[in-house]
Image (spheres, rainbow, N blue to C red):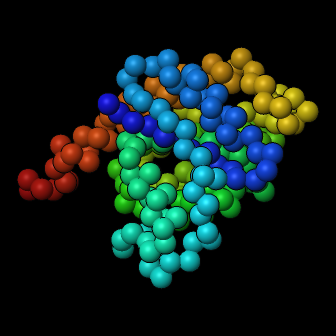
Amino acid sequence: MTKIAIVTGSIRPGRQSLNVANWVKSIADQRADAEFEVVDIADFKLPVWDEATPPSFGPGEGAEGQAWAAKMAEFDGYVFVVSEYNHSITGALKNALDFVYGQLNNKAAAFVSYGSAGGARAVEHLRGILSEMQVAHVRNAVLMSLFTDFENFSVFTPTEPAAASVEPMLEQLVSWTKAMEAVRDGAFAPVGANA
């Protein structure tokens, strides 16, 4: 069965990303074509990435980073819950991504974001990071505003348009995740291989 992680993007006290991730999972669990699991980066207690060599060269040496990398390797695709800080992703999410590389190669990702502009600017930054990590990211996303989807900017109260945008995002993500499974299995020859 296709496995998709719903990855939180914040570790700070009072964060909303775990609430949002659990909400996405409650919708995703109605599907029968994939299994979904919330993966909370706060659970891994990652230090600031300071390995001698980048993850593209091999696994890191620290136990926390190895546990995180092993967890991310379990999945075929990802939904990243992205909270926008200063027009970008959180330092915690960027740091977590710096610990992995091969574990995400040729997999698919989608985004559920929130912020004053729906988190759109953070998602655009994350798309660039994931492209470098060879992750195929889908167009459909869930963008939520702090002004309409959070009561008093602190209580998660998703609107109907936000809820309605989850299923199209998941539909596209599951399709792309299955397609990338074929890529990882070698179903497609490299360009020019038969030349």
Q: Residue at x 29, y 41 (%)?
A: 181
Is residue 189 among the parts visible in the rendering? yes
* Position of residue 42 in the picture relative to residue 62 (left or right): right
* Position of residue 180 in the picture relative to residue 125 (left or right): left
In the figure, 28 relative to 135: above or below? above
* Position of residue 39 in the picture relative to residue 31 (left or right): right
Q: Residue at x 71, y 46 (%)?
A: 83
| Residue lying at the far bottom of the rendered structure | 52
Is residue 122 among the parts visible in the rendering? no
Q: Quadrant of the N terminus?
A: top left
Q: Residue at x 35, y 50 (%)?
A: 106
**134 and 14: which one is in front?**
14
Residue 111's x, y, as percent?
58, 39
Residue 19's x, y, as percent?
70, 35
Residue 31's x, y, as percent?
45, 19
In the figure, 133 relative to 108: above or below? below
* Position of residue 49 in the picture relative to residue 92 (left or right): left
